[in-house]
Amino acid sequence: MRCSMVSIVVLKGAGADTQVLLLQRAREYLRGVWSYVAGHIEPNETGSQAARRELAEETGLVPHVLYATSFCEQFYDAGSDCIMVVPAFVARVDDACAVRLNGEHSALRLADVRCGNARAAIR
């Protein structure tokens, strides 16, 4: 199986101060939708290489660490009439870094990530 896209969740901070980067899409497809960094894998590029490149292109950020997760998004792409499988990555960036958006996004937000007690959430 070959994947043609990657998604990247960007995290800043640590512990209770962790924030996730959200980007508002500017182009016609999904205009106005808040999302994370995502993009296509170029020929002869690995998923992790694509994740680093897309992160730099869309935000100007360079992660100090990049994790491959065990999570893959799945969705039906009507244009190619197939189910797309998109591996997810998590990028940790320095707290002092500045985000520089390209034309794909019109705004950004850093949302607080609150990790609650898993047992309490299940009850």
Image (cartoon, rainbow, N blue to C red):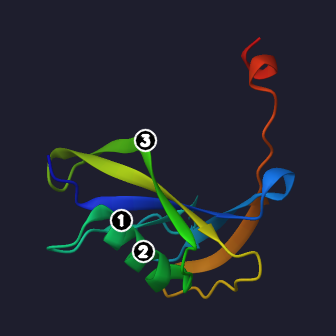
Q: Percent position (x, y) of residue 95?
A: 76, 75
The numbered dot on residue 48 is: 1
The numbered dot on residue 87 is: none
Q: In the image, is 46 to the left or to the right of 101?
A: left
Question: Is residue 120 visible in this depiction of the protein?
Answer: yes
Q: Residue at x 51, y 87 (%)?
A: 102
**Residue type marked 2:** Arg
Question: Disc 1, disc 3: CB below 8 Å?
Answer: no
**Residue type marked 1:** Ser
Q: Is residue 41 above or below residue 114?
A: below
Quarter assignment of residue 34: bottom right
State the SS at label 1. helix
State the SS at label 2. helix
Q: Earlier in the sequence, mark 1 or mark 3?
A: 1
Residue that sits furthest to the top in the current view: 123
Question: Disc 1, disc 2: CB below 8 Å?
Answer: yes
Q: Percent position (x, y) of residue 7?
A: 43, 59
The numbered dot on residue 71 is: 3
Q: Earlier in the sequence, mark 2 or mark 3?
A: 2
CA separation in Å, label 1 and label 3: 14 Å
The numbered dot on residue 52 is: 2
CA separation in Å, label 1 and label 2: 6 Å
Q: Is residue 21 above or below residue 42?
A: above
Q: Percent position (x, y) of residue 104?
A: 47, 80
Q: Is residue 66 above or below residue 112?
A: below
State the SS at label 3. strand
**Residue type marked 3:** Phe
